[in-house]
Amino acid sequence: MKTTITPRVRNLVLLLLAVTGMLFAGAGTASAHAALTGSDPSSGVVVDKAPTQISLTFSEKVATNNNSLRVLDPKGKRVDVGKPSNVSGTTYAVQVRSGLPDGTYTVAWQVVSADSHPVAGAFTFSVGAPSKTTVSVSDQDVGGGLVGGLYGFGRYMSYAGFIVMVGGAAFILACWQRGAGVRALQRLVVSGWFSLTAATLWLLLLRGSYTTSGKFGDIFDLNLLGQVLQTKTGAALVSRLLLLAAAALFIAVLFGAYDKREDEEKRDLTFGLAIGGGVVASGLAASWALAEHASTGLQPGIAMPVDVVHLLAVAMWLGGLSALLVALYRAPADNLVGRTAVQNFSRIAFGSVLALVATGIYQSWRQLGSWSAFTDTGYGQLLLVKIGLVALLVGIASISRRWTARLAETAEASATVVEERAPEKEKAHASASTKTADSGATASAAASASSATTTAKAGVADATASAEADSDGAASATGTDSEGPGDSKRAAQLARQQTAVDTARQKRLRDADPVRFGLRRSVLAEAAVAVVVLAVTTALTTTEPGRTEEDAKAAKASSSSAATSSSGALTLDMSFDTGGTDGKGVIRLDLDPARVGGNEMHVYVQRPNGRAFDVPEVKVAFTLAAKKIGPLPVTPDRIATGHWAANGIQIPMAGDWKISVTVRTSDIDQTTVDKNAQIG
C-alpha cells in the first residue's frame, strides 16, 4: 500500500534532522574521559639532574601502545627508549636515555581511557635551564576530525537502532500483539536491527583510526583492526554482533510463526519470546555498559547493572513510543491500534520513567560528585539540558494519557464490529450519521460527530464507490485487450488512481475520530522531543564526566603553582623508591606562601595507592646553586601518620631553589629526591 506524508509531518521531520545535525556540528572534538592528574617531572618544572624515566598519573587506568608516551628533545628528536609500562595503579612510565643535556623537553602522550575514549596532551619540563624548542605543546587533536565525526554518527545510529528494535518488539509483545502483522511495524523493527548491525560494523572499522592516527585511510588497516579486536571495546563490539544474530532469529519468529498463530495460541508463545528477547536485549545493553562510563570509576560493580537497566528503560519508553507513532499513522484502517494497547504502553512508559529517574540520579551522583559540577562542567550543563528535555517529554506524555482515557473502544472491538456487521444493520442505519462508521472511531466520538464529520464520511463512501468503479474499469481494460500498449497504459493509470483513492480512504478513516487524531499529534510531539533527547544522550557519552574534569582542573592548578613564581602556596609531588620490599611512595610538599621570608611547610608521604605512609624520618633541604646558598636543612615535626610539618622556614632570597627531601622507610633503607621550583 502506498503511503503519503503530509507537508506538516515532512517539515517536522526536516526540523528534527536539522536540530540533530546542529547538535553534532557543535560537538567538535570528543572530550577525554581520563585526565592527567600528575607527572614526574611536573609540567613546567626545572630539574637540576636529568631524570631516568618520565611517569604520568591519570584519573583512571588507560591502554597504551609503543607510541603512547613520547619524550622529545629541543630539536624534536625522541629520547625515550622501550615501551611504556604500568608502574603502579594508574601511573605509567617510559625510560629515557641517560645523560640528557640541558634544555627544554616535551612529553607528548596519547592513550585510550578505560571507558573507551582516546585522550592526548603534552607538556614541557627543563633540565638545568629552559631553552628554545621546536616542538609545539598544544593538545593533540585526538578523537576529532572526519574520523571522529563519523565515529560519533555511528554511535548515534547504534543507540537509535537499539532503541527502535528493542522498544518496537516490546510494544508488539506487551501492548499490541496484533501489530505483529502490520507491515509498518515490521519495517520499523527490522530497520532498527539493520541500523544497529551496520553501525556496529562501522564502529569496528573506525575504531583503530579513531584511537590512534585519526586518518581516514587507516580505516581499512588490518593491523589496526587486529589490535582493536584485542581491546575491551573490540570484544564488546564483536559480542554485540553475535547477539544481533540471535536478535535476527527472534525477529524472524516474531513476524513469522508468532504472527500466524491465533490469539489464544499467541499467549503461550508470548512468554517464551519475552524471556528470550529480554535476555538478548540485556546482553546488547551490557555491551555498552562493559566498555564505557559504567565500567570505570566509582563502584563499577553497581554502575554496570544500573547502566543496563537505564538503557533498557530508555528503549522501552522511546522505542515503544516510536512504535506507537507508526501504529497510529500507518496501521491499516481495519486494524487500528485500540485503547487497550495504548493504555498498556502508557503503564509501561510510566514504569520506564520511574526506572530512568532512579538510575539517572545514581549516574548523576557518580559522574558529577558535587552540585557545583552541574554548572561548572560541560557534562553537568549537558545533563541539565537532558533533564529539562525529559521533563518536557513527561509533560507531553501526560497530554497523551488524557487522549488515551477518552478512547471509548479498542481497535480489536472495532474490527470485530466491521466483520460481523449484517447487511440488514447497514440498511437500517443507512440514513443515520453512522452510515459509514470508521472502524477505528469510537462510539462516543461517532455519536457526537458534527454534520461536517458526517459529510466527510459520506465522501469516504463516494470515494470507495469511485475506487470500486475504477477497479472494475481497470479489470475490464486489462481483460479485453491486455496486450495492446494503449490498454496497458490505461490499466496502469487506473491502478494508480485506485491506489491513490485507497490511500485517501485509509487516511480519512484514521482521521475521522477527533480523539484518535489528537492522540496522534501528541505522540508525534513526544517523538520529536525524544529525537533530541537521544542526541543529547549520545553527546553525554562522549563528554568528560564532571568529577574527572574537576580533578583535572585541580591537578593543573597544582602543577601550575609549582612551576610559576607567585606569592601563593607551592606544591611539589615527588615519587621515591628506597629499594626495600615496601619502599615505593609519593611525597607531596606544600610551602606557603612560597616567598622570601618566613614560610610554613607541610610534607605528606603516601603509598602508591594514596594511603598515608608511616615512615620513621623525613628531612628537607633548600639549595640556591646560582648564589651558592645552602643546603639549608629543615627537620619537620611528625604531626600524624604520613604528615610532617615545620614553621618559620626562612628563604633568604628569590630564585630557582632546589628542594631535596630525604625519606627513610626502615633502619637501612632511605633515599633522597629533589625538584627545582621558583620561590619568591
Image (cartoon, rainbow, N blue to C red):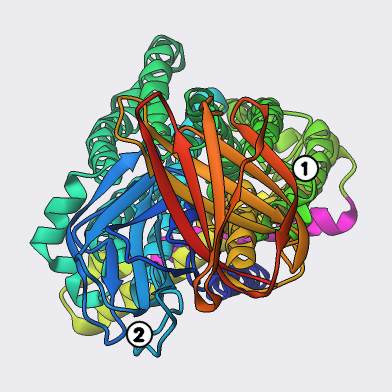
- Magenta residues (range): 450-475
- Checking the image for residue 496, the label placed there is none
Q: Is residue 423 visible?
A: yes
Compare residues 570 and 479 and report the one nearer the observer.
Answer: 570
Compare residues 244 and 429 and report the one nearer the observer.
Answer: 244
Q: What residue is disc 2 on?
A: 135
Residue 238 vs residue 265: left or right? left
Image label count:
2
In space, the residues marked 2 and 1 are separated at their CA atoms by 53 Å
Compare residues 152 and 350 and report the one nearer the observer.
Answer: 152
Classify residue 72 by image quadrant.
bottom left
Q: Residue at position x 44%, y 35% from top?
A: 608
Q: Secondary structure at mark 1?
A: helix
Q: Of helix, strand and loop, which mostly describes the magenta segment? A: helix
- Checking the image for residue 394, the label placed there is 1
Compare residues 85 and 334 and report the one nearer the observer.
Answer: 85
Residue 99: say if magenta.
no
Mark 1 crowdedness (10 Å alpha carbons): few <14, some 14-19, many ≥20: some
Q: Position of residue 310 (x, y in %)?
A: 57, 33
